[in-house]
């Protein structure tokens, strides 16, 4: 049987995604054992799983170290990897949004200062609006930027909005909905297309339940 290598994002999203694979009949019991293994195989089902940092999944798939993987739409929009996006798994749902201090009014005469770790998403969003911006690239605690006057707004992922609310920030614009996407390496899809499509079909029936 042809073995499919699957890159899964570490953390809560990856666990949700693995349970979808399990329901679809592509399980690997050893993945639930407490050990330090990095790769988990089930030759009978023809799958090999490994956990990687969520932002690295697309790199493993694009470069062919994994045939398929699951990455957030935010990663695909930000890094634009050369992969096939085959299915919206309808899990890990959130949104990419612009947030600012309560009562914020955009003064279009000035360059808008935008703090974010999603520089490409912010740039393409504001360029589509013809808005002149100054990107301040940060890697964490983005919410601090407008509070301390470093930026006017932030562009970030919003799930419940609780963190924003606690810090007197509010969503002022929504950019795009985000969810987990099933992606494939282009070469793998060419040579293992039948096996990959069978997996996509099996997963699709469980994602449709989420509609």
Image (tube, rainbow, N blue to C red):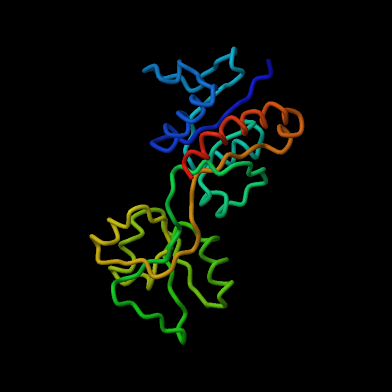
Q: Quadrant of residue 35?
A: top left
User: Percent from the top left, x then y, of residue 26?
Assistant: 55, 22
The residue lying at 54 percent from left, 67 percent from top is: 125
Q: Horizontal placement of 65 versus 209: left or right?
A: right
Residue closest to the far bottom:
109
| Residue 165 vertical placement versus 27 (above, below) | below
Quick one: 53 or 159, which is closer to the camera?
A: 159
Residue closest to the far left:
166
Q: Quadrant of residue 44?
A: top right
The residue lying at 55 percent from left, 60 percent from top is: 120
The residue lying at 53 percent from left, 25 percent from top is: 49
Q: Quarter of the image for the N terminus: give it.
A: top right
Residue closest to the far top:
44
User: Percent from the top left, x then y, of residue 198?
Assistant: 66, 28
Quick one: 121 or 196, which is closer to the camera?
A: 196
Q: Horizontal placement of 109 versus 67: left or right?
A: left
């Amino acid at each position: 049987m042809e073995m499919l290598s699957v890159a899964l994002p570490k953390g809560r999203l990856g666990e949700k995604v693995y349970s979808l694979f399990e329901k679809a009949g592509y399980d690997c019991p050893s993945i639930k054992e407490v050990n330090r293994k990095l790769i988990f195989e089930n030759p009978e089902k023809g799958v090999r799983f490994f956990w990687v940092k969520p932002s690295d999944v697309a790199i493993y798939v694009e470069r062919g170290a994994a045939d398929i993987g699951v990455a957030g739409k935010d990663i695909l929009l930000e890094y634009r990897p050369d992969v096939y996006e085959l299915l919206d798994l309808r899990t890990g749902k959130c949104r990419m949004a612009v947030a600012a201090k309560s009562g914020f009014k955009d003064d279009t005469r000035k360059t808008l200062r935008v703090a974010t770790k999603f520089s490409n998403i912010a740039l393409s969003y504001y360029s589509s609006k013809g808005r002149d911006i100054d990107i301040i690239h940060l890697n964490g605690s983005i919410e601090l930027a407008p509070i301390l006057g470093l930026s006017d707004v932030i562009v970030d992922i919003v799930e419940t909005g609780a963190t924003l609310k606690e810090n007197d920030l509010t969503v002022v614009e929504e950019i795009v909905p985000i969810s987990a996407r099933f992606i494939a390496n282009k070469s793998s899809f060419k040579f293992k297309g039948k096996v990959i499509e069978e997996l996509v079909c099996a997963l699709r029936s469980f994602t449709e339940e989420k509609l």
